[in-house]
Amino acid sequence: MLKSTNYKHIIWDWNGTLINDAWLFVDVMNNILQKRDMHIITIKKYRDIFGFPIKNYYEKLGFNIKKESIEKLGLEFIK
């Protein structure tokens, strides 16, 4: 376990607020989509459809969350 005294500040970058990392989210999602022979997305498409709840985002991508749980898909994305 890390000692909390090693850090003075923690910066949380929520979805590219500080660092433009949208390309990484698109790349990871496109790998997941390709494994299922689904249409890949562009950064523009990602920005157009991303939102909360995440379930809606996955449905907009074309996932059938009745066949694949949102929990399973989320874990796959994180891995």
Image (cartoon, rainbow, N blue to C red):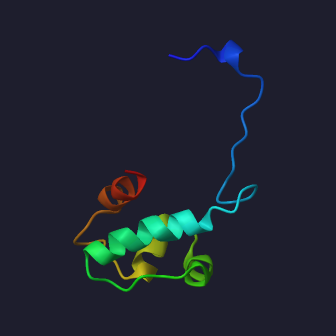
Q: Position of residue 75 (x, y in %)?
A: 35, 53
Q: Can I make out residue 21 in this image?
A: yes
Q: In this view, does 3 lie to the left or right of 68?
A: right
Residue at the spot 50% in from the left edge and 16% down from the top edge: 1
Residue at the spot 25% in from the left edge and 67% down from the top edge: 68
Of all residues, the one furthest to the left in this rendering is: 67
Q: Where is residue 44 in the image (x, y as percent from the top left)?
A: 61, 83
**Closest to the observer, 66 or 57:** 57
Q: Is residue 15 left or right of residue 56?
A: right
Q: In this view, does 67 lie to the left or right of 45?
A: left
Q: Give residue 23's quadrant in the image.
A: bottom right
Q: Is residue 11 above or below residue 74?
A: above
Q: Can I make out residue 64 in this image?
A: no
Q: Position of residue 76 (x, y in %)?
A: 33, 57
**Closest to the observer, 14 or 42:** 42
Residue at the spot 40% in from the left edge and 78% down from the top edge: 59
Q: Where is residue 20 in the image (x, y as percent from the top left)?
A: 69, 63
Q: Give residue 40's quadrant in the image.
A: bottom left
Marker count (numbered): 0
